[in-house]
Image (tube, rainbow, N blue to C red):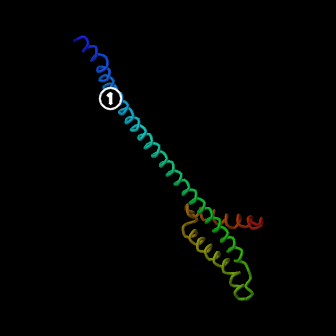
Amino acid sequence: MFSALFSFLGGSVFRAIWGEASSWITNSQDHKHEIEAMRLQAEIDDKTHAREMDRLKVSAELNIQQIEVQSEGDLAIKDADAFVAAMATINAKTGIQWVDAWNGCIRPAAATIALILWVSWLWTSGFKPTEWDKELVGVILGFYFAHRVFVSKGK
């Protein structure tokens, strides 16, 4: 009788109990594995998101810098165009004789007065030019000679 009972319990009941236990262990391991995979995927997604945000930030900063450089360039071009337009109108005749005479003599008179003051300063210092005097001579020569070269070439 014991052998029949052992045979019955050893066969079907033991297999059912062992089947349930192994199924539970397998499901538990699968669940842990699935949770770990989800955690790793979340970490990967977070890192991917952070890299994408950094890339977008750098891209936006570069676009802002590009816009700033372009606007500065546009302003420089507009300033140069305005300066050229102002220079073109300096020698334009107004049709009023005394205004045209004044405009024709004011710049040479101002330059002459400045040169007289500068030469008198050099005279009192014994004609020992300082660095400022040397730079002034360079500016004057550059203005009078380089300016005439550019004007003659139409620039």
Quarter holding residue 82 = bottom right
Q: Amino acid at mark 1?
A: Trp
Return the x and y of residue 13 as percentages of the image width and height: 29, 21
Residue positioned most to the left? 2
User: Is the residue 150 above or below the residue 112 in the image?
Assistant: above
Q: Nearer the viewer, residue 73 or 131?
A: 73
The residue under the point 62% across, 61% down is: 73
Assess disc 1: are there few (<14), some (14-19) or many (≥20) residues with their C-alpha within 10 Å of its C-alpha.
Answer: few
Left or right of residue 58, residue 83 in this image: right
Q: Is residue 155 left or right of residue 122?
A: right
Query: x%, y% of residue 54?
Result: 48, 48
Identify the residue shown where x is 29% and y is 23%: 17
47 up-or-down from 150: above or below = above
- Nearest the viewer among 38 and 63 is 38
Q: Who is closer to the viewer here, 147 or 6? A: 6
**Horizontal and vertical percent for residue 140?**
65, 66
Indicate the quadrant where residue 102 lies. bottom right
Residue at which label 1 appears:
24
Q: State the image coordinates of residue 119 (x, y, percent, origin top left).
A: 60, 71
Which quarter shows the N terminus? Answer: top left
**Residue 20: which quarter of the image?**
top left
| Residue in the picture at 63% in, 77% down | 110
